[in-house]
Every structure is written in C-alpha cells, then in structure tokens.
Image: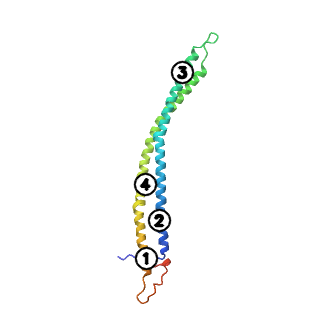
Amino acid sequence: MARSANVRSLDAMRHFRHALARFVEDATNALTALHMEVHRALEWLEHDRPHYWRNEVRRCYEQVAQARAELEKAKMKEVAGHRPSCYDEKKALELAKQRLRRAEEKVELVKRWAILVRDEMNEYRGRLGALERCLETDIPRTIAMLDRSIAALESYVEVQTPESSEPLDVDPGSTEST
C-alpha cells in the first residue's frame, strides 16, 4: 500500500517540530518542578511534622506537670482558716491536659496522613510514568522522523527537472509531495 502525504508548507513542519521540542522541554520542566513539590510535601509530612508534634507532646507533658504542681501548691495554702477553691489552677490543669491530648492526636494524625500521601504519591508516579516515557522516547523519535522528513522534502524541492536546468517551480514554503 502506497503512503502519500500532501505537504503544503515546510515552514509549517519546521514550526510543528519546534513546537513539539518546546512542549517536551516545558512538560519535562513542569514534571520536574511537580516532583520536587511532591517530595518537599512528603518530606514535610514524614519528617518535619512528626518531629514538631513529638516536641509539642513533650512540652505539653511539662505543662501538665507544672499545672499539677501549681494545683497541689494552691491546695496546701490556707487563707483565714479554710482552703481556697483552686478554680484557676484546676482550669489551668484541664487546659494543659486538653493541649496534651490534642498534640497526641496530631502525632497519630500525621502518621496516618503520611501513609496516605505516600500511597497517593506512588500512584501519581505510576500514572505519570506513561507521560514521562512519551516525553523521553516517543516524542524525540517523532522529532527525529520530522527532521528526516523535512530534510528529504528539502532535497526533493532542490531537485531539478531533466528537461530544464531550472529548479522545480515549487516554493519551499508551499511544497507538495506524494
């Protein structure tokens, strides 16, 4: 089966080739930036946040201990023969315990999110694998084929007819080939 092409403009082919090469460059840069952002987010979630919340848990334990000590100290005081209600100290202890519970919850929450994000990142990488292969192999092959086709068509345009010594009356900007 004979294959033919109706090429009207070598300039259009050159422009398409350039646009395709530019697309590969832009898409590769975008993927690289995206990979870096995802890696930074995962690093933040797997290392920075757990470290932060573990430190918060330690700090909250210290605050609970401090609030307990303040409450015990207040309970031992006697004012005019009777003990104070220690309302402020009890409230401070409850608040410190709430902060501790929140920090402990955050430690667990960050662990769960890190696992979830890691799984999603692996799925993302798998899905982008086809695009990356296309950018690394398929499109460069297509560009090479376009280069060969453009070179062949340019050679064809330069061929002179046997009857005359003048080149074919075909404008390189509007070349027709079969």
**Dot 2, crowdedness within 10 Å: few (<14), some or many (≥20)?**
some
- At label 1, the amino acid type is Leu
Instruction: Evaluate whether residue 93 shows in this view.
Output: yes
Q: What residue does disc 3 label?
A: 68
What residue is drawn where x is 42% and y is 45%? 119
Q: What residue does disc 4 label?
A: 128
The quarter of the displayed image where residue 138 is located: bottom left
Residue 109 position, x and y percent, is 47, 37
Q: Earlier in the sequence, mark 3 or mark 1?
A: 3
Q: Which mark is residue 153?
A: 1
**Dot 1, crowdedness within 10 Å: few (<14), some or many (≥20)?**
some
Q: What residue does disc 2 label?
A: 20
Eyeballing the image, is 141 above or below 91? below
What residue is drawn where x is 58% and y is 17%? 74
Q: Are marks 3 and 2 in contact (CB under 8 Å)?
A: no
- At label 4, the amino acid type is Leu
Q: Earlier in the sequence, mark 2 or mark 1?
A: 2
Residue 97 position, x and y percent, is 53, 27
Q: Are marks 3 and 1 in contact (CB under 8 Å)?
A: no
Q: CA distance from mark 4 to mark 2?
A: 19 Å
- At label 2, the amino acid type is Leu
Quadrant including the N terminus = bottom left
Residue 134 position, x and y percent, is 41, 60
Q: Earlier in the sequence, mark 4 or mark 1?
A: 4
